[in-house]
Image (cartoon, grey):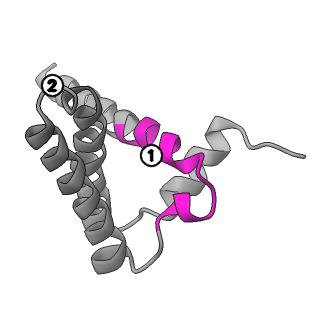
Amino acid sequence: MATKSLREYLDEYGEGHRHFGTRLTHMFGIPMIVASLPIFPFNPLLGGGLFVGGWILQFIGHYVFEKNDPKFFGDPVNLLIGVVWAAKEWVEIGRASCRERV
């Protein structure tokens, strides 16, 4: 069984997230979902709200902007790849912001 490299997963993930609206909804939705996980046991209302709100943003991105299914429907590994992708996008924005100041 052949496995994909992280680069291959990220490239494939990026291909399914080309529309600006999808990228934007994922850049906020994914961190909301991740943040909800440790918050939920201590504050179920806040954790649940972040979790549900994050998923709503994800599905808006796919069905309103991109017009495709989420990548994890075909391969659950993409649930983790999405987290890496969002982190990479935020780092790139941070780097660009730092370059503008120099």
Is residue 65 rendered to the left or right of residue 71? left
Callout 1: helix, strand or loop? helix
10 Å neighbourhood of mark 2: few (<14), some, or many (≥20)? few
Q: Position of residue 83 (x, y in %)?
A: 41, 39
Callout 2: helix, strand or loop? loop
Q: Residue at x 28, y 79 (%)?
A: 64
Task: Say which mark, if any, is on residue 42.
Answer: 2
73 or 62, which lies in front?
73
Q: Nearer the viewer, mark 1 or mark 2?
A: 2
Q: Residue at x 49, y 55 (%)?
A: 14
Q: Mark 1 sits on what residue?
A: 82
Q: Which residues are magenta?
A: 70-86
Which three-letter amino acid code belongs to the residue tagged 1? Gly
Which three-letter amino acid code belongs to the residue tagged 2? Phe
Whether 62 is among the magenta residues is no
Classify 25 as above or below 5.
Answer: below
97 or 21, which lies in front?
21
Q: Position of residue 16 (x, y in %)?
A: 49, 65
